Image (cartoon, helix red, strand yellow):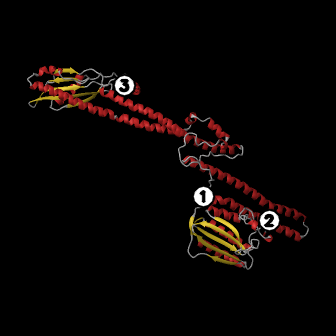
């Protein structure tokens, strides 16, 4: 991560409530702050807008799919039918065994087996049940039918189930076109299916399905005498008893499903409006800025909708986009100002060059020409230095982002710089003093860039010193910061210049040193330090309780970096 990425780009926003539920259009920006294009788009918004939103459609469809899958699973597993089938089978087994006990009692009382019809006459059978009595050879000796009455009174409406059944029947008719449906099995044939197993002395149960899909049950129980099977009693149920009950239960499930589906669609539309609409406005605002740039339209600034009142990710996105747009405009303003400053600074040496070249044609004496050539050479070198510094300053932002931060020993870096620049100071007759702690101080950042800052500060201090002056570099750690201080005993900084020394192209130099510095060194140093989350300032050195109007003892530059 580059050093510049740690600097904040978000502007202070007026925050709304941090909690609570926002629905519908509660988030909408005040009309006074919204662009006309955005207001016009909101005026056309409605259900049709949600219908055109892919995100809204996805929210509605996915919420519907969850309910559809759940209900389909319940209907497919069919727990109601399985439970009813089991209960019905147990009821028929009990009823069959009771009838078999009646027939066995008649035989034990000396009534012949051929009189089984009379025995069945006194048995009260359930509705829709048909009973058969077979002899050991499988011949029907007696037969009786239960009372005819509806299972449930009064019958309930199954409109949804009937509609789905008709749809399914229509699909089945199309898929089985040309096939003749088989007739439903008779009660006697169902009884004969379980007869062989009952003749072995055990109770047999069988569940069959009619062509219409209804369940039909048959149960057979043996009549025993002296350990031998003397007769078999078989009961069969009417078609569709269980399915009628299942249809009622399924109708209730489908009714709840329809209600839940409608509620889910409504809530999904509300949820989609709180997500898709603000995202649509954010996208429209961004597209509006793009189109303005593309079509060279009005230079008015693009306003990103203020959704800071939303306590969710969309609110965070709005804050981030507003901060990003504000940072971009700040960068545009800074670039425009930089371009204006560059044009102003280049004009001065160009004007001097133009004047010198024009005067060169008029000069008669060799000493005049030599002087003019020196002026031209000075201005050319000044332009070259200025263009180089401008190039470095313009590339600094991108380089600070691209370069990777590493942990390094600040004391070692300062020692190496002091050793090299101390020799330069000694050649000028300036005493160079260092006061660095013996223990290492580790910081994370771009070592080469921070070294550039310290080199700028120390060389500036040396340039303002004369023979007999001194430059002192010292470092101290203070809690979570480390201070690097560069002091000199030079002329100090004019009071009116203390707030200007870090501005681009500002240079406060003696007359004889004019044009040898571009005025970008301190501005670049401040940019690098702030990109590392630090601070830098300049001040004059004065004795304690000194008169503020007295001459300073020198200048001091302080760099504070986070540890």
Could you say whether the residue bearing mark 3 is in a helix, strand or loop? loop
Cα–Cα span, label 2 and label 1: 38 Å
Residue 474 has which mark? none
**Residue displayed at 40% across by 37% down:** 70
Outermost right residue: 364
In the picture, measured across the screen, residue 346 lies left or right of residue 103, that is: right
- Dot 2 or dot 1: first in sequence order is 1
**Quadrant (top left, top right, bottom left, bottom right) of the N terminus:** bottom right
Q: Quadrant of residue 457?
A: bottom right
Q: Which residue is mark 2?
A: 379
Q: Is residue 16 visible?
A: yes
Cα–Cα span, label 2 and label 3: 104 Å
Mark 2, Cα crowd under 10 Å, few <14 / some 14-19 / many 20+, is many
Q: Is residue 507 visible?
A: no
Q: Quadrant of residue 399?
A: bottom right
At which x and y percent is residue 527? 66, 62
Mark 1, Cα crowd under 10 Å, few <14 / some 14-19 / many 20+, is some
Q: Which residue is mark 1?
A: 5
Could you say whether the residue bearing mark 2 is in a helix, strand or loop? helix
At which x and y percent is residue 157? 38, 25
């Amino acid at each position: 991560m580059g050093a510049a990425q740690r600097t904040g780009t978000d502007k202070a926003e007026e925050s709304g409530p941090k909690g609570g539920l926002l629905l519908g259009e509660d988030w909408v920006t005040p009309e006074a702050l919204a662009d006309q294009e955005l207001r016009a788009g909101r005026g056309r918004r409605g259900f049709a807008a949600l219908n055109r939103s892919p995100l809204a459609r996805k929210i509605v469809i996915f919420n519907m799919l969850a309910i559809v899958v759940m209900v389909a699973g319940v209907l497919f597993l069919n727990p109601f039918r399985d439970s009813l089938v089991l209960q019905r089978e147990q009821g028929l087994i009990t009823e069959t065994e009771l009838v078999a006990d009646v027939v066995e009692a008649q035989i034990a009382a000396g009534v012949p087996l051929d009189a089984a019809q009379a025995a069945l006459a006194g048995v009260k059978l359930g509705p829709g049940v048909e009973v058969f009595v077979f002899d050991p050879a499988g011949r029907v000796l007696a037969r009786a039918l239960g009372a005819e009455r509806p299972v449930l009174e009064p019958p309930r409406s199954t409109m949804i189930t009937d509609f789905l059944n008709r749809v399914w029947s229509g699909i089945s008719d199309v898929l089985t076109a040309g096939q003749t449906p088989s007739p439903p099995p008779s009660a006697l044939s169902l009884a004969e299916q379980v007869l062989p197993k009952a003749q072995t002395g055990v109770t047999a149960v069988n569940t069959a399905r009619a062509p219409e899909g209804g369940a039909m049950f048959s149960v057979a129980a043996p009549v025993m005498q002296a350990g031998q099977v003397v007769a078999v009693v078989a009961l069969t149920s009417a078609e569709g008893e269980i399915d009628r009950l299942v249809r009622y239960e399924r109708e209730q499930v489908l009714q709840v499903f329809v209600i839940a589906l409608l509620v889910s669609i409504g809530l999904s539309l509300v949820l989609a409006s709180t997500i898709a609409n603000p995202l649509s406005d954010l996208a429209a605002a961004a597209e509006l800025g793009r189109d303005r740039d593309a079509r060279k339209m009005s230079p008015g600034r693009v306003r990103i909708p203020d959704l800071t009142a939303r306590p969710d990710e969309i609110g965070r996105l709005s804050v981030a986009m507003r901060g990003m747009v504000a940072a971009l405009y700040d960068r545009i303003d800074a670039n425009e100002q930089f371009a204006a400053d560059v044009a102003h600074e280049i004009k001065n040496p160009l004007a001097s060059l133009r004047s010198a070249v024009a005067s060169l044609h008029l000069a008669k004496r060799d000493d005049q020409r030599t002087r003019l050539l020196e002026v031209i050479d000075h201005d050319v070198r000044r332009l070259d230095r200025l263009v180089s510094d401008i190039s470095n300053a313009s590339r600094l932002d991108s380089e600070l982002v691209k370069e990777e931060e590493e942990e390094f020993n600040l004391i070692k870096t300062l020692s190496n710089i002091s050793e090299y620049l101390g020799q330069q100071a000694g050649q000028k007759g300036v005493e160079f003093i260092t006061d660095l702690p013996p223990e290492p101080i580790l910081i994370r950042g771009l070592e080469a860039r921070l070294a550039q800052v310290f080199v700028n500060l120390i060389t500036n201090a040396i340039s303002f010193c004369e023979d007999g002056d001194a430059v002192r570099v010292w470092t101290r750690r203070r809690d979570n910061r480390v201070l690097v201080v560069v002091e000199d005993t030079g002329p100090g900084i004019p009071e009116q210049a203390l707030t200007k020394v870090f501005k681009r192209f500002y240079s406060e130099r003696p007359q004889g040193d004019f044009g040898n510095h571009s005025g970008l060194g301190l501005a670049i140093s401040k940019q690098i330090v702030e990109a590392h989350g630090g601070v830098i300032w300049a001040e004059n050195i004065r004795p304690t309780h000194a008169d503020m109007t007295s001459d300073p003892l020198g200048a001091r530059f302080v760099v504070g970096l986070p540890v």
